[in-house]
Amino acid sequence: MTLPTAADLPRPGEPRPGEALRLMAVHAHPDDESSKGAATMARYVSEGVEVLVVSCTGGELGDVLNPALAHDEHVMANIAEVRRAEMAEAVQILGVQHAWLGFHDSGLPEPDENGVTPPLPEGCFALLPLDEVTEPLVRLVREFRPHVMTTYDENGGYPHPDHIRTHEVSMRAFEAAGDPEQFPGTGDPWRPSKLYYHLTFHKKRLVALHEACLAEGMESPFGDWLATWEDKPEDEARLTTRVPCGEFFEVRDAALKAHATQVDPDGRWFHLSTDTQRLVWPTEDYQLARSLVPDVRGADGYEDDLFAGLRVPAQSVSA
């Protein structure tokens, strides 16, 4: 991979003709990359985009969610090493590059019988000072020089301490990496052009998948979720970008199943066929949170490409 020197850097939003586009996906734990945006990444890899997945923690405190492995003594005694091996397999399936930030999983403490939630473990990712956990990400941004970054929204997608911290770190790095006064010694400044939040579970998609399950006569994993869904006026506007990637749903599922401790391959989340999913919702969805290039949306009001506004003719692609 040949990168331009700092003196040659284009303004944000202006990749050179013939230069590979670059996408950095920042995630909290191994397996998050396969459950959020995996088909998007596989599509872009197939088109020659360079994709780097960043895992902020090793997932050491994640529960074993696959019943077939829940009592495996080797797995339980070596969960950190097992999850690293799972991540390596998923990376190979997706065809992406990968980097660990190296911080320790914060876990998701549950309240005890008295309703008291135990504190997070000392030295974990969520408790370390923000600049301390941001510095290695800034270093990676300046080294890899992504045109686009993806991360979680201000609620972390869901309120896991590491997901919320991943949002904070990503936003801090996005703003700081292009400023030569910040984080000196971590490489030449680089300014990504766009940053997106994953919008994997929004109501329109859940309704489409729920109705598809019912139409096929199967139990829907989305019914209880939708029954307690709280509609918020601002939610509709959050959906800005729908990336067509249905032909890569099988790659997504294979990568997710590579995280065997985290996924039950026979679970109901996999009961709806990928053919049906392609039919009812063939995209992965995002919220454009930061952009230094003009807004580019189609007649339907959505972008269909994370690199919308960044492509030059040599990089054009059909969806």
Image: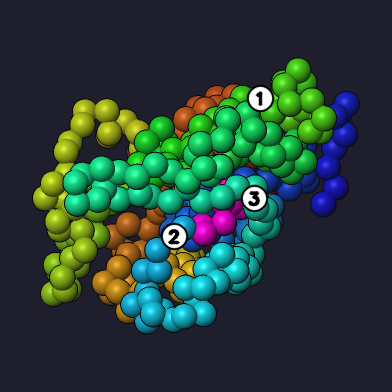
Residue 257, compared with residue 221, is above or below; it is below
Answer whether labels 1 and 2 touch (C-beta < 8 Å): no
Distance in Å between CA atoms under marks 3 and 2: 16 Å
Alpha-carbon neighbours of circle 1 within 10 Å: few (<14), some, or many (≥20)? Answer: many
Majority SS type along the magenta span = strand
110 left or right, relative to 88: left
Alpha-carbon neighbours of circle 2 within 10 Å: few (<14), some, or many (≥20)? Answer: some
Alpha-carbon neighbours of circle 3 within 10 Å: few (<14), some, or many (≥20)? Answer: some
Q: Nearer the viewer, residue 29 or 288?
A: 29
Please check the rendered image and state whether residue 47 is part of the magenta-colored stretch, yes or no.
Answer: no
Local SS, label 2:
loop
Local SS, label 3:
strand
Dot in front, 3 or 1: 3
For residue 84, which quarter of the picture? Answer: bottom right
Dot in front, 1 or 2: 2
Distance in Å between CA atoms under marks 1 and 2: 30 Å
Residue name at image x 81 percent, y 33 percent: 187
Q: Amino acid at mark 3?
A: Gly
212 left or right, relative to 22: left
Q: Nearer the viewer, residue 310 or 65?
A: 65
Residue name at image x 56 percent, y 61 percent: 42
For residue 148, which quarter of the picture? Answer: top right
Residue 102, numbered label: 3
Residue 176, numbered label: 1
Residue pointed to by mark 2:
62
Residue name at image x 21 percent, y 44 percent: 115
Of the numbered discs 1 and 2, the one sitting upstream in the chain is 2
Residue 168: image location, x then y, percent: 51, 32
Over which residues does the magenta segment extend? 51-60
